[in-house]
Every structure is written in C-alpha cells, then in structure tokens.
Amino acid sequence: MYLLLILLLASFTTLKETITVLGKITNTEDEKIRIKGESFDKEIKLKTNRSFSENLKIKYEGLYTIAIAKNSIPLYLLKE
C-alpha cells in the first residue's frame, strides 16, 4: 500500500507560537494521524475527504514524525 501525503507548513498568528499544518492523505481507511516530537504528541482527525488542518503550538524547531497506522515520515517544523 502506498501512502500519499501533500503537506504545507505556514506561520500563523504570533511569531514562534503557533503553526498551521495542513494536508491530505490518500490510500488509507484510517480516520486519524499523529504528529510526534520529543515532548509533543498530537492526534488529528481526518475529515471525510481525508484532509486535515490543525494549529499547533510547538516548543522547538526540529524533527517531528507524522504517522498514520504503521506508516510514518519525518517532518521538520519551523517556528517562523
């Protein structure tokens, strides 16, 4: 099974406080994704069209993981 992920990261509201993560996942029947970091773990529900959008408060810039079921990919988040 292939996992297709389209992801866009953007700064939002106050600098270095909140970022917006959004995208769309195809080729899955799962209803949620999970974004994890060293001291961060957030579960996001997928909409019926398999898209998602979430404002996140992250404590550090760096490498996180986005996972769905048993598939995961690295994700670098910036606080700009």
Image (spheres, helix red, strand yellow):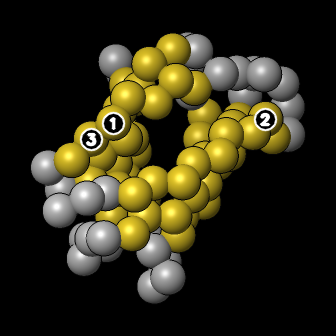
Q: Name the residue under label 3.
A: 72
Horizontally, residue 44 falls left or right of residue 53, namely left
User: How far across and down, in percent of the image, does residue 19 sit?
Assistant: 69, 37
Name the front one of labels 1 and 2: 1
Q: Looking at the picture, tell me which residue is in the foreground, 5 or 40.
A: 5
In which image quadrant can residue 30 be found? bottom left
The one of 50 and 5 positioned closer to us in this rendering = 5
Sequence-wise first label, 1 or 2: 2
Tally of marks:
3
Q: In which quarter of the image is the N terminus?
A: bottom left
Mark 1: amino acid: Ile
Q: CB of mark 1 within 8 Å of CB of mark 2?
A: no
Quarter where residue 3 is shown: bottom left
Helix, strand or loop for disc 1: strand
Residue that mark 2 sits on: 11
Residue at x 78% of width, y 35% of height: 11
The answer, for residue 43, to whether it is visible in the render is: yes
**Given the image, on which type of amino acid does mark 3 rest?**
Ser
Marks 1 and 2, how far apart at CA: 21 Å
Residue 44 lies, in percent from the top left, at 42, 58
Q: Label 2 near label 3: C-beta < 8 Å?
A: no
Secondary structure of the residue carrying tag 2 is: strand
Camera-side mark, 3 or 2: 3
Q: Which structural element holds mark 3? A: strand
1 and 3 marks in contact (CB < 8 Å): yes
The residue depicted at 75 percent of the width and 39 percent of the height is 10
Which residue does the image show at 27% across and 71% down from the upper left? 28
Q: Left of 24 or right of it: where is 18?
A: right
Q: Mark 1 points at which residue?
A: 73
Where residue 61 appears, x then y in whole percent?
Answer: 58, 15
Q: Position of residue 2 (x, y in %)?
A: 25, 59
> Residue reaching furthest bottom?
48
